[in-house]
Amino acid sequence: MRLPDKTTSMEEAVSQIESGATVMLGGFGVPGTPFALIRELLRQGQRDLTIIKNDANETGLGVDHLLAEGRVKRLITTHIGLNPRAIQMMNDGEIEVEFCAQGILAERVRAGGAGLQAIVTDIGLDTELARGKATVDIDGKPAMIETALRADAAFVHAAKADVFGNLGYCATARNFNPMMAMAADLVIAEAETVLPLGGVAPDEVHTPGPFVDHVVELGELSEEYDIVRR
């Protein structure tokens, strides 16, 4: 069986995202954030998005572009403290923000990718993070139910890929990208380098190709990627 070539133009890949979609964005601050795909989403004009990302980036980077243009309806994240615009929009009621402990966000996404409906944890009990969430008693100890997270689409950033979509990440880009690539119906990967099939050594594959729908080669990195230039 011949494996398909999944390389696609960025415009064509992102055009499959509809307004109102839930989109997971990989990244841990700057490393691993798919800036080019976010820019294309901004250019195409999709609106009323629910964004799931570890953070809201900083002013003038990534998610902030979507916020500035009023494209985000809801943000599920661990913190927004580095983005004054996100804080102001939340306080003004312009966007809905759901906060998660960082490990819990990761585990909710992992659970979604594993086909689970929820996880049970005692993290966040008796805090604002527990507001409106169901609790249970397990062996005499209270616990909170955190629903799993899935998305219509996930944008991930890889250091390298092959044409089938086997992906390799660098450093902290591995924090959220691999699990998000398992928890979305449509996965679009931007890669700094795209190699022929077999070009990514088996031990260097962090996301296997069957999870990936489209691969976009970046070529030269824009200034938003400065911190991860190697």
Image (spheres, rainbow, N blue to C red):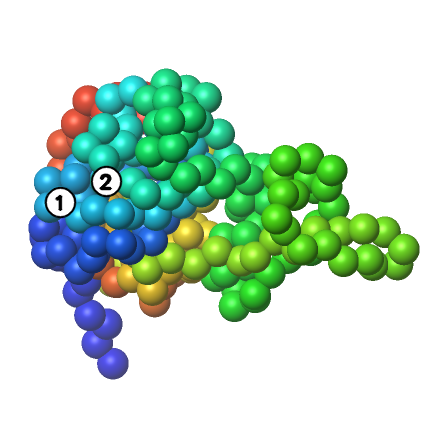
Give, as a three-letter code, the residue at label 1: Gly
Would residue 59 appear left or right of 141 to someone viewing this image?
left
Q: Residue at 57% across / 50% down in the picture?
A: 107
Q: Which mark is residue 59?
A: none
Image quadrant assignment for residue 173? top left
- How far from the left and from the top, in percent, is residue 142? 81, 51
Q: CA distance from mark 2 to mark 1?
A: 8 Å
Q: Residue at 38% across / 57% down in the picture?
A: 151
- How far from the left and from the top, in percent, is residue 4? 20, 70
Q: Residues within 10 Å of mark 2 (few under 14, many from 20)?
A: many
Q: Which mark is residue 45?
A: 1
Q: Is residue 202 above or below residue 219?
A: below
- How far from the left and from the top, in percent, is residue 68? 23, 28
Q: Quadrant of the N terminus?
A: bottom left
Q: Residue furthest front?
A: 92
Image quadrant assignment for residue 192? top left
Check if mark 2's residue and mark 1's residue have beta carbons within 8 Å. yes
Image quadrant assignment for residue 34? top left
Tell which of 27 and 134 is nearer to you. 134
- How far from the left and from the top, in percent, is residue 211? 36, 63
Q: Residue at 38% across / 32% down in the picture?
A: 93
Would residue 148 appear left or right of 181 to someone viewing this image?
right
Tell which of 27 and 100 is nearer to you. 100
Residue 34 in sight: yes
Q: Residues within 10 Å of mark 1 (few under 14, many from 20)?
A: few
**Label 2 element class:** loop
**Label 1 element class:** loop
Q: Residue at 19% across / 33% down in the picture?
A: 69
Disc on the earlier residue, 2 or 1: 1
Give the residue pinned by disc 2: 71
